Image: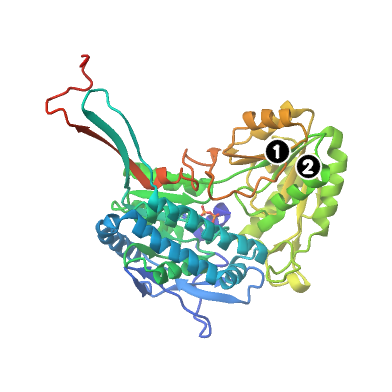
């Protein structure tokens, strides 16, 4: 997706959803949040946020910010840091608990605005907001923990301990597919640890992040501690990654953009935490409960129209149940109701924008022509009737795919899944691990021994047994191996290791010089 969007932008055309357009008087104009004030971009330009289920609906106009706006936000966060880091962590957490209450109060509105903004069905946007609530309550609880540790010192009358200190000013860059959950995964731990921050939300979903920041303001987070600047990644995103005052960049998005962000951070020794792509696998063994596996595959492949980094984009199925599985899968995929996510009957919404349609249909063509896999169902854009004004694509299944095909290797980020036959558990594991990503994997089997064997052998950050590749919970670490990340984990208590730095403290109460790192025994 990032690739297609950037190619268009580089050719001088504005992105189909985010291009600056002439003002429409009836549409609300939103502003950036800098130093506790809601302010327009210094350049005065805006971009439109459009409903992907019906592009006639403009959700709002958001600031097409400049590097200067970003620098002002960074300055505000820098100035607020000393005061905020000195607020005791339990007090910081109290504000965050209030934020959780506000999100609960407004959950229905926030969910429906998110569905209008990015298309996924209400059940899923409700889940997105709920994840932000769960993250807020769980992580705010850290205000009364933020555990360090004590440990024996090498010498007598000497005390050793380790405490967490905030990192400083954090830059957060987020994608559009979980437009409130992912910002919350970064904002809440950053704040509880005593950092200040600037967030740059995705171009396609500024409203959900705006709603979260508005709730932060209402909860009483002091001016300058949280700042939001909207606009293009190449301008304001880059201005954030390049600002020397920003100590840490936490990024979630495509592997391609993540690599750019990481290299910019490396140039100036900034800390960088990356959460990127996936090509996740469900392994279905011959003893699996096939109906359960079908439900998991359909939910994992077509939930959020396949636009999750944990989407089940590969289904590796034992050849003994391959035919039965694929027949049932295709029937289920064909029966899915595609439409506007606001309609309670809809099972799958649109994809995010025109570039996504282009990219996904491009992969359908690659699958058929270049790879030579069988297009078992779907593969077309839906563009008539109720689908005429939106970015709808049929749920798509490729069968008889080989592990090395592009559709089996590359992240498509759309409602397309690839079924690959396997001869054995070992063969399935080899195929499962044979991609450049390592986010999530799952196995369907009734055999506990084989489940544990796969759990041990799959080199991913997340693993499920008899469940789909999606469904992470906030109190467990989230992240992946290989090209999915750079070794960090969000969520759980592990996220605290991103947003705080360790300080080792030695207290020598012997009253004399005791030399460590010297080869002498002080007994
Ligand atoms: P996606 O294609 O899923 O939108 P991207 O990786 O392109 O994923 O975008 C994720 C986030 O990174 C967005 O907020 C986007 O604006 C931002 N971004 C894109 N390019 C850059 C860049 N060069 N520097 C910093 N941020 C960027």
> Dot 1: what SS?
loop
Q: Residues within 10 Å of mark 2 (few under 14, many from 20)?
A: many
Q: Residues within 10 Å of mark 1 (few under 14, many from 20)?
A: some
> Dot 2: what SS?
loop
- Measuring 65% from the left and 39% from the top, which residue is drawn there? 441
Q: Are marks 1 and 2 in contact (CB under 8 Å)?
A: yes
Relative to residue 360, is residue 466 depicted above or below?
A: above
Pick the front one: 354 or 207: 207
- Measuring 40% from the left and 67% from the top, which residue is drawn there? 65
Relative to residue 264, is residue 336 depicted above or below?
A: below
Residue 389 located left or right of residue 253: right
Q: CA distance from mark 1 to mark 2?
A: 8 Å
Relative to residue 137, is residue 326 depicted above or below?
A: above
Residue 373: mark: 2
Quadrant where the C terminus sits is: top left
Relative to residue 418, is residue 354 depicted above or below?
A: below
Residue 269 located left or right of residue 496: left
Q: Position of residue 351 (x, y in %)?
A: 65, 61
Using the rendered image of the protein, determine whether residue 365 is visible from the camera's viewpoint.
no
Residue 518 located left or right of residue 95: left
Q: Which residue is mark 1?
A: 405
Q: Position of residue 53 (x, y in %)?
A: 66, 69
Ligand 1 within 8 A of label 2's CB? no
Here the colouring is rainbow
Quadrant location of residue 107? bottom right
């Amino acid at each position: 997706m990032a690739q297609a969007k950037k190619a268009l932008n580089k050719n001088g055309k504005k992105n189909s959803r985010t291009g600056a357009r002439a003002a429409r008087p009836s549409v609300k104009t939103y502003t950036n949040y800098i130093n506790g004030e809601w302010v327009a971009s210094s350049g005065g330009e805006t971009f439109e946020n459009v409903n992907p289920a019906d592009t006639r609906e403009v959700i709002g106009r958001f600031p097409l910010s400049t590097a200067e706006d970003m620098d002002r936000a960074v300055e505000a966060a820098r100035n607020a840091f000393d005061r905020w880091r000195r607020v005791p962590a339990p007090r910081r957490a109290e504000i965050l608990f209030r934020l959780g209450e506000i999100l609960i109060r407004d959950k229905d509105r926030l969910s429906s605005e998110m569905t209008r903004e990015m298309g996924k069905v209400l059940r899923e946007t409700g889940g997105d907001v709920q994840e932000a609530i769960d993250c807020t309550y769980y992580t705010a609880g850290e205000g009364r923990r933020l555990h360090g540790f004590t440990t024996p010192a090498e010498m007598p009358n000497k005390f050793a301990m380790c405490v967490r200190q905030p990192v400083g000013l954090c830059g957060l860059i987020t994608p559009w597919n979980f437009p409130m959950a992912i910002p919350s995964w970064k904002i809440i731990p950053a704040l509880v640890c005593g950092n200040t921050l600037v967030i740059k939300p995705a171009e396609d979903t500024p409203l959900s992040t705006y709603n979260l920041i508005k709730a932060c303001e209402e909860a009483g987070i002091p001016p300058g501690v949280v700042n939001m600047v909207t606009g293009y990644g190449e301008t304001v995103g880059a201005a954030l990654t390049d600002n020397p005052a920003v100590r840490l960049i936490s990024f979630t998005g495509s592997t391609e953009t993540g690599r750019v962000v990481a290299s910019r951070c490396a140039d100036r020794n900034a800390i960088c935490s990356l959460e990127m792509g996936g090509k996740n696998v469900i392994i279905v063994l011959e003893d699996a409960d096939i109906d359960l596996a079908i439900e998991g595959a359909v939910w994992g492949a077509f939930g959020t129209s396949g636009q999750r980094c944990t989407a089940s984009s590969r289904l590796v199925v034992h050849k003994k149940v391959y035919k039965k599985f694929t027949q049932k899968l295709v029937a289920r995929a064909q029966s899915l109701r595609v439409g506007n996510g606001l309609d309670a009957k809809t099972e799958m919404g649109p994809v995010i924008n025109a570039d996504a349609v282009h990219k996904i249909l491009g992969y359908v063509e690659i699958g058929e022509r270049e790879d030579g896999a069988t297009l078992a169902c779907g593969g077309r854009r839906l563009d008539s009737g109720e689908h005429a004004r939106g970015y709808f694509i049929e749920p798509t299944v490729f069968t008889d795919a080989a592990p090395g095909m592009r559709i089996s290797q590359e992240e498509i980020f759309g409602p397309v899944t690839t079924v690959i036959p396997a001869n054995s558990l070992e063969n399935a594991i080899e195929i499962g691990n044979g991609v450049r990503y390592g986010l999530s994997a799952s196995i369907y089997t009734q055999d506990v021994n084989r489940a544990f064997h796969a759990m041990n052998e799959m080199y991913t950050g997340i693993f499920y047994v008899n469940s789909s590749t999606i469904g992470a919970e906030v109190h467990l670490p989230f992240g992946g191996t290989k090209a999915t990340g750079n070794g960090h984990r969000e969520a759980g208590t592990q996220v605290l290791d991103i947003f705080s730095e360790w300080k080792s403290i030695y207290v020598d109460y012997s009253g004399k010089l005791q030399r460590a790192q010297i080869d002498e025994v002080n007994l």
